[in-house]
Image (cartoon, helix red, strand yellow):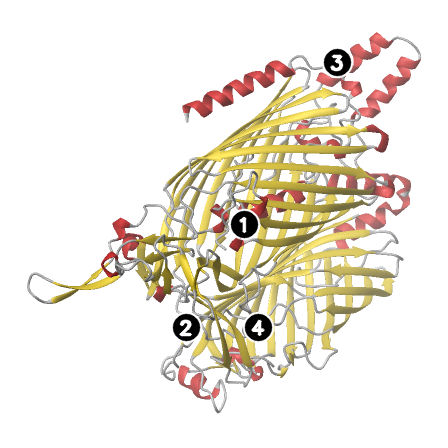
């Protein structure tokens, strides 16, 4: 959520201040004479609404703006001592977009969308390094002949302990030595995607603001809904601002207990929290967070301001991480040998972590912002202290140096130090003095198996290293470049290192969990106010072009949303920024060619002679987000840059009559496969061939750069490889592709029409995973009618021919269904499109263009066996300036 | 809990008392304060990214916590 800050004196970057115009006149007055009159007039002016830059608007750089940001989080490898793990560290790709619009002078609406996809190795628990559990190396030959070596997680085992319950290691000479080292047990996860949408509504008075916000975050195993209200009061001639806020979040965990470790985690004590559904064991729980904060901002002088904040959060309910276990070493007191030189046998098991159901957190923060006059820089220094009733207290120190340079550049180096103490229920592992299981002779004289008493385990226990004591040092830099037309590019980088030894005052208890990460991000920020101002200046200067502009905005842009590269900017120097969203769904019947295929046909004919099919896709959803940046260096040439971000979800079903499962087969009940992240990046040039009244023709020559990954894998389950994910679920083509196209468009009166031929030609023989996608040819024709000056409707026909995949995966893939075979790809498709298109003609949002189109499949003629297409939605927004 | 609340109130009162004696900065003297890099948060996008990462890796509480969202961070 965007936050409202009380600094009401900020002018928007790149935006001429609203004040100076009135002030400059007054300054001239003052030159001519009476300073007291100047002061009186200025003071009077400042109390008039609208003359003063409004507080939230000024301080919030996202106001009246649209921002797109991509960010990559990459962790380094964990220290597993001498064990080589082939598991890739955690990586998260995040796409974020937000927009803020003023609905009236005093009311603004904001919205945001965030999507992140993560994958990689994550710790399940920690064990003594001297135990037989942990990360056990293995080497395995796959059916393809590949040899895979790695380490698989073992959360059960044995360990020897001395009389003080310290783990013992037996060295090569046979001597026993205490080995206090612990090690994380790493498991891996297939890619998972989270999406979050939020909105905010703010109203500003002269001396106060009120904000309402809310949102929803969804991922496969966690869903949260939240709402908040916040505000600000300015007083003391706006030298002082008081801020307040309150919020509520309701979250639900619904985790499928991992089949990787499920069989090995003992959940005897927590059975009441487990639910059974569709042969799955679920861990479910609700959580409620009430949050509040109070803050004060104060101007201390012409160059200095300070900000103080207090936050209180009360959380209740299920706060466990459902995928974290705790190692319990069971020691049977009856089996401890009387001779103290004989080591104790520990039986190492894992239980689910247990956290308290209530948490109260308090945080106090302060910030100083100081202008450094000689170099025109700003120094931001911050400190925060927090504590809670779990025993964690933290200290954070951070400093930023914001240094504007010439030509619109700004560079901001920053440094941060963080330290926290351990939660009072954190332990890398615990020892329980009871037998895990034992056999006793019952009253009836029969032997009985007795399991451990869960009530003898601590009520609260966690080995999640985030609750340990440690310190972290991070540093980074942000670089901004502002362009004249209200566009700003921003890039940020941060490196973060977590170390137990960095804990403030020493005493860190988790050096086995030390790690580092970096985050790199890039953003485009569009300041709509600056864009509009610039546009009105340009139109003023080039009044004779106005008709042309108007023509393009209301006519040329009206085109079905599904058409890419369909129009050109007419004037040298023009920019267009756009966003495109596409959603496509396949579900229902499996088809062979254009005929319905029976399960038996799929089993016998859909895979290969040596392996029959066991699964078929049940549904597949694909979503694509594309940023569309267009620039006209000359009137006949346009250049386009289009980064793409995709996410896919495929549900599978078991085919009726499938061959019996192999031992250790990767099963799919209830959990769809998901992937997501950066897709290929398109670079396109459009060349004008004809531009006469009513008729336009242009050609496009473009490239698709292989920035999307094609080596995405499903996770390993114990030692069974997940293998490469299905062809359709990889994020790009993996090859450099040539994208030629030719577009004709025309209009007469209220009618417009057009036709386009476009293609995709793969320029390489194979990608890094050993295959190349088929070439694509598409032909489309459309016609539309302007119902009003700003609103139109269109119909379209589309024919697409997509080739089969050439080559094949060069690494292991499970080959469980038709989607894993190159022959079951591509085909010929016929669609009808129904679209609407609108350009905001006047007012605050003038020039914004929106279009939607639904593509309804008319006929599928697939190569091989594929899942029926259900349709696709295209939605676009663009702004030309 | 009550102790913490009292401490907070005391701190707030002290801060307000201390600041009431601050120099008066006339509106036409606030040009420097109006510079974009003097904003309390000069780059909200960067702050959002960082807070999300810290929030999923650290257990310390935040002072700007009314927002919500951010997901489970169960990794």
Q: Chain of mark 4?
A: A
The residues bearing labels 1 and 2 have C-alpha atoms spaced at a distance of: 29 Å
Which residue carries the number 1 mark? A196
Nearest to N terminus: mark 1 or mark 2? 1
Q: Are marks 3 and 4 on the same chain?
A: yes
Q: Chain of mark 1?
A: A
The residues bearing labels 3 and 2 have C-alpha atoms spaced at a distance of: 73 Å
The residues bearing labels 1 and 3 have C-alpha atoms spaced at a distance of: 45 Å
Q: Are marks 1 and 2 on the same chain?
A: yes
Which residue carries the number 4 mark? A728
**Residue A728 location (% of width, % of height):** 57, 72
Which residue carries the number 2 mark? A667
Which residue carries the number 3 mark? A44
Q: Chain of mark 3?
A: A
Left or right side of A2 for A325? left
Nearest to N terminus: mark 1 or mark 4? 1
Of residue A82 and residue B58, the one placed in the foreground of this image is A82
SS class of the residue under badge 2?
loop
């Amino acid at each position: 959520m965007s936050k409202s800050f009380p600094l009401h004196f900020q002018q928007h970057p790149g935006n001429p201040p609203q004040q100076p115009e009135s002030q400059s006149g007054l300054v001239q007055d003052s030159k001519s004479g009476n300073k007291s009159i100047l002061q009186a007039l200025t003071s009077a002016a400042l109390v008039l609404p609208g003359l003063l830059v409004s507080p939230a608007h000024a301080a919030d750089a996202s106001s009246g703006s649209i921002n797109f940001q991509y960010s990559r989080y990459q962790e380094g490898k964990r220290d597993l001592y001498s064990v080589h793990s082939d598991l890739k560290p955690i990586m998260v790709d995040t796409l974020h977009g937000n927009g803020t619009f003023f609905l009236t002078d005093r009311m603004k609406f904001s919205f945001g969308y965030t999507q992140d996809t993560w994958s990689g190795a994550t710790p399940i628990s920690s064990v003594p390094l001297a135990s037989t559990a942990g990360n056990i190396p293995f080497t395995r030959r796959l059916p393809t002949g590949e040899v895979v070596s790695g380490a698989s997680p073992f959360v059960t085992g044995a360990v020897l302990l001395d009389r003080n319950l310290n783990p013992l290691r037996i060295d090569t000479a046979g001597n026993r030595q205490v080995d206090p080292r612990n090690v994380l047990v790493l498991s891996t996860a297939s890619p998972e995607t989270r999406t979050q949408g939020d909105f905010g509504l703010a109203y500003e008075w002269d001396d106060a603001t009120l904000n309402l916000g809310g949102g929803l975050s969804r991922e496969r195993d966690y869903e949260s809904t939240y709402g908040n209200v916040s505000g600000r009061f300015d007083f003391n001639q706006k030298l002082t601002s008081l801020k307040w806020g309150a919020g509520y979040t309701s979250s639900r965990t619904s985790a499928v207990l991992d089949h990787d470790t499920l069989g090995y985690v003992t959940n005897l004590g927590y059975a009441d929290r487990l639910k059974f559904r569709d042969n799955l064991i679920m861990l479910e729980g609700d959580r409620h967070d009430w949050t509040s904060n109070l803050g004060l901002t104060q101007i201390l002088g012409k160059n200095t301001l300070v900000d103080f904040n207090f936050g209180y959060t009360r959380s209740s309910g299920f706060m466990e991480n459902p995928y974290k276990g705790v190692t319990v070493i069971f020691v049977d007191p009856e089996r401890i040998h009387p001779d103290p030189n004989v080591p104790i046998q520990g039986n190492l098991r894992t239980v689910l972590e247990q956290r308290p159901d209530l948490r109260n957190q308090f945080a106090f923060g302060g910030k100083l912002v100081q202008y450094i006059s000689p170099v025109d820089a700003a120094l931001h220094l911050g400190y925060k202290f927090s504590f809670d009733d779990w025993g964690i207290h933290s200290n954070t120190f951070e400093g930023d140096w914001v240094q504007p340079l010439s030509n619109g550049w700004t560079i901001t180096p920053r440094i941060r130090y963080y330290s926290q103490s351990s939660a009072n229920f954190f332990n890398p592992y615990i020892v329980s003095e009871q037998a895990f299981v034992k056999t006793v002779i019952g009253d009836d004289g029969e032997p009985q198996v007795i399991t451990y008493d869960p009530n003898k385990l601590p009520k609260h226990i966690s080995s999640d290293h985030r609750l340990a004591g440690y310190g972290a040092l991070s540093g980074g830099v942000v670089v901004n470049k502002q362009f004249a037309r209200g566009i700003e590019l921003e890039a940020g980088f941060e490196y973060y290192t977590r170390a137990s030894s960095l804990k403030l005052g020493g005493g860190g208890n988790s050096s086995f969990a030390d790690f580092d990460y970096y985050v790199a991000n890039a953003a485009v920020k569009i300041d709509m106010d600056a864009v509009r101002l610039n546009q009105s200046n340009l139109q003023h200067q080039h009044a004779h072009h106005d008709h042309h502009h108007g023509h393009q905005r209301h006519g040329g842009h009206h085109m079905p949303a599904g058409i890419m590269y369909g129009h050109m900017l007419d004037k040298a120097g023009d920019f267009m920024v756009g966003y495109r969203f596409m959603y496509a769904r396949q579900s229902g019947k499996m088809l062979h060619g254009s005929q319905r295929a029976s399960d038996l046909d799929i089993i016998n004919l859909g895979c290969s002679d040596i392996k029959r099919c066991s699964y078929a896709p049940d549904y597949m959803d694909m979503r694509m987000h594309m940023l569309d940046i267009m620039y006209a260096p000359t009137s006949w040439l346009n250049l386009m840059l289009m980064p793409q971000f995709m996410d896919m979800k495929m549900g599978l079903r078991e085919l009726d009559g499938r061959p019996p499962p192999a031992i250790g087969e990767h099963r799919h009940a209830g959990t769809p496969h998901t992937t997501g992240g950066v897709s290929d990046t398109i670079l396109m040039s459009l060349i004008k061939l004809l531009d006469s009244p009513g008729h336009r023709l242009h050609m496009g020559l473009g490239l698709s750069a292989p920035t999307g990954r094609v080596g995405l894998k499903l996770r390993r389950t114990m030692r069974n490889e997940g293998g490469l994910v299905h062809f359709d679920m990889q994020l790009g083509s993996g090859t450099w592709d040539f994208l030629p196209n030719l577009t004709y468009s025309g209009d007469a009166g209220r009618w417009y029409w057009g036709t386009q031929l476009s293609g995709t030609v793969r320029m390489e023989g194979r990608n890094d995973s050993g295959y190349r996608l088929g070439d694509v040819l598409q032909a489309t024709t459309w016609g539309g009618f302007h119902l009003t000056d700003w609103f139109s409707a269109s119909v379209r026909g589309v024919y697409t021919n997509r080739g089969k995949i050439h080559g094949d995966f060069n690494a292991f893939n499970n080959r469980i269904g038709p989607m894993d075979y190159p022959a079951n790809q591509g085909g010929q498709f016929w669609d009808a499109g129904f679209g609407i298109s609108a350009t905001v003609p006047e007012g605050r949002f003038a020039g914004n263009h929106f279009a939607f189109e639904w593509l309804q499949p008319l006929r599928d003629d697939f190569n091989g066996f594929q899942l029926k297409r259900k349709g696709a939605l295209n939605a676009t927004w663009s702004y030309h300036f | 809990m009550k102790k913490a609340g009292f401490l907070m109130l005391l701190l707030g009162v002290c801060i307000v008392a201390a600041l009431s004696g601050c120099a008066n900065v006339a509106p036409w003297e606030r040009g420097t304060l109006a510079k974009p890099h003097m904003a309390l948060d000069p780059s909200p996008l960067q702050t959002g990214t960082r807070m999300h990462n810290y929030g999923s890796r650290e257990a310390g509480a935040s002072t700007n916590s009314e927002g919500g969202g951010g997901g489970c961070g169960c990794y």
